[in-house]
Amino acid sequence: MIGRQTAAAIATASAKRIRMKLPSVPLPRSPRNTLRPLCAATVSVLSVAACSSGMDPSPINVSITPATAAVRIGLTQEFTAVVSGTENIDVAWEASCGTIDGTGGTVTFTAPWAEGDCVVTVRSQESPGRSAVATVTVTRVGLGPNLLLNPDFATDLSEWQIILDAAVPRAIWNAEDAGGGAGSGSARVSHPLPGNNAHRIALKICLPSAPGVRYVYGGAARLTQELEGAIPSFLLWSFVNASCTELTPLEARSALNFESSDEWAVEGTSYTAPEGTAYIAFHVTLRKNSGVNMEAFALFDDLFLYQED
């Protein structure tokens, strides 16, 4: 009996509470006022969603021109970046190969001395996640075939004149390949004498030429030990005779010197044969500066000598 009365009383009270009239609340007169909280809430939700998903809500945009380019080995290409959506237009440049010279919106890319693809990237300094990339195809367009015989020293030093000291060769074949390829090798050059700032020629090839012919030459080299002042080098000289022993009256020559490093590097340069040239000689050398008395060793591989078309 008590339980039924209690239940009935509760039901009656609940019904009364449900039927209770709520006080009237005036609606906002301007619909703009009504939308403001909703818009703020919407922005907050979108911001949280962007942050939680790793998205960059920044409106900054970066573009690069040109987006693709074909560049001959050793030559240059300008790239321009445009940053929008911010007052800070500072950018940072980088390249997967070759080099970048300059800063700001326009820089100069210099192609490496090996064929392949390079990627040039420009990033907003304000928002590094905003970037643009350009693809550069490095080619030998405009250059003839490699004039050097056995340029990669695949199994020996054949086709090259090996300079001797009392029947001891200054260069011998080595099994290490610059590209890490199996079944190929390199030329190992030694320099046991005290340094005197002179190039010690180890290998030589003599080829017919003519005045005014323009060449692009170089290759890969490295020291086998860390030795400051020991410099792997290539020399291209002009001669008047087939034995490449008599220099032209101008004694024209070109030297390509590497850094004193024990890591492989590929370098190149160009040379124009002067008047009087009938032959040119490509030399593989190791130079030691004065004061460097320790015996030095260097490896050379993948040499090239191209004539411009």
Image (cartoon, helix red, strand yellow):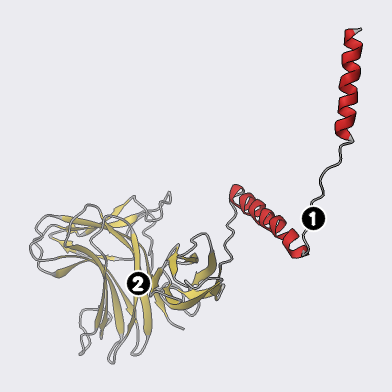
Q: Which image quarter: residue 207?
A: bottom left
Image height check: is 219 above or below 14? below
Residues tagged 2 and 1 counted as in contact (Cβ below 8 A): no
Q: Could you tell me which secondary element the residue under label 1 belongs to?
A: loop
Instruction: Categorize mark 1 by other alpha carbons within 10 Å: few (<14), some (14-19), many (20+).
Output: few
Q: Nearer the viewer, residue 177 or 65?
A: 65
Name the residue type under label 1: Pro
Where residue 223 sits: x, y (%)? 25, 56
Tell me the number on the disc at residue 299. none
Q: Residue at x 48, y 65 (%)?
A: 123
Q: Mark 2 or mark 1, which has the lower sequence index? A: 1
Where residue 308 sits: x, y (%)? 43, 82
> Quick check: 263 left or right of 95?
left
> Quick check: 220 left or right of 121?
left
Where residue 9 sits: x, y (%)? 88, 19
Name the residue type under label 2: Gly
Q: Residue at x 26, y 55 (%)?
A: 262
Q: Which image quarter: residue 148?
A: bottom left
> Quick check: 84 left or right of 203?
right
Q: Nearer the viewer, residue 107 or 222?
A: 107
Single out the residue that lies furthest toward the top: 1
Q: Could you tell me which secondary element the residue under label 2 belongs to?
A: strand
How many angstroms separate mark 2 from mark 1 (CA)? 83 Å
Where residue 72 sits: x, y (%)? 47, 75
Name the residue tied to disc 2: 268
> Which quadrant is home to the N terminus?
top right
Mark nearest the camera among 2 and 1 is 1
Image height check: is 2 above or below 63? above
Q: Residue at x 90, y 36 (%)?
A: 19
Instruction: Categorize mark 2 by other alpha carbons within 10 Å: few (<14), some (14-19), many (20+).
Output: many
Tell me the number on the disc at residue 26. 1
Q: Nearer the viewer, residue 213 or 66?
A: 66
